[in-house]
Amino acid sequence: MNKIFSAGRLLQYRLLSGSPNSVHSPFVFELYNTVIRDKTPFYFHLDVESLRSKMLLDNTVIDVRDFGTGGKKNSRRKLSVRYIASHFVQGKKYGALLSRLVNHFKPRGILELGTSLGITTLYMALPDKNAKLITLEGCPETANLAAKNFSRLGASNIELRVGEFGSTLEEACRDLKQLDFVLFDGNHRYESTMKYFHTCLNYVDEESVFVFDDIYWSPQMEKAWKEIKANEKISVSIDLYHMGLVFFRKGIPKQDFVLKF
């Protein structure tokens, strides 16, 4: 992560982000007030956070393959599970947001690019166990830990596929047939993000929701975010600083929102 860049963008976000009163789109106003700002926990959140707590105490060292979060492309590093849990796993605040979004939109087909330890995956899979969730992970040893976490919470609706996204993404899209909800959280490089975005675009309809993590991770991610929200298929974008949401609703004037979260 480019910490200086991200800090500057955080200051900009705080200056630009609007309150509920600044939202004049009925669709976004309802979503913001009933889903994004809602803090009501789901029954399973304690179970997921209990898993996170165990990961944060686990000093086991594993071989981690890095496909795009930083350093050299396809690099390998020895990292402890606790380090991964504290640096590369979605926080509780945003995990809970993903649960609320899934519960609100009720997607049948969910795709996640970047499983990590599976904490975020569980936040999306558990609101509705009838939904099918395919999660893609490039690192075999990290994926092995995630699979154990899924088993511990009985998340039988999760299908974990291991391999580089370039070889697993297209098949996952075809198997889901329609992408109702997608979380992009596995590569923070401009070219890769745009490539995966355009692949997924072929499987959307107007009810689809795309969520992009770490949109201000680096200048490359900011560039990707700007191009994504400008895409002609997208009608509404919501910038929450750490995450960006885009929607494909027809009959809605194209608008971009920066909202407090």
Image (spheres, grey):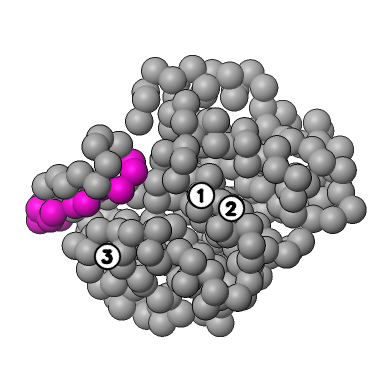
Q: Which mark is residue 198?
A: 2
Q: Which residues are magenta?
A: 56-69
Q: Which mark is residue 135?
A: none
Spatial separation of the CA atoms under disc 2 and disc 1: 5 Å
Work out whether residue 47 or residue 118 is closer to the camera in this orientation and state it. 118
> Which residue is labeled 1 in the image?
195
Secondary structure beneath label 1:
helix
x and y percentages locating residue 3 in the rendered image: 37, 23
Work out whether residue 145 or residue 71 is closer to the camera in this orientation and state it. 71
Q: Are marks 2 and 1 in contact (CB under 8 Å)?
A: yes
Spatial separation of the CA atoms under disc 1 and disc 3: 23 Å
Q: Determine if residue 116 is in view.
A: yes
Number of other residues with Cα within 10 Å of mark 3, as a class: few under 14, some 14 to 19, many 20 or more: many
Residue 51 lies in magenta, yes or no? no
Residue drawn at (79%, 55%), measured in percent from left and top?
A: 249
Spatial separation of the CA atoms under disc 2 and disc 3: 25 Å
> Which residue is labeled 3 in the image?
143
Going by the numbered disc 2, the residue's amino acid type is: His
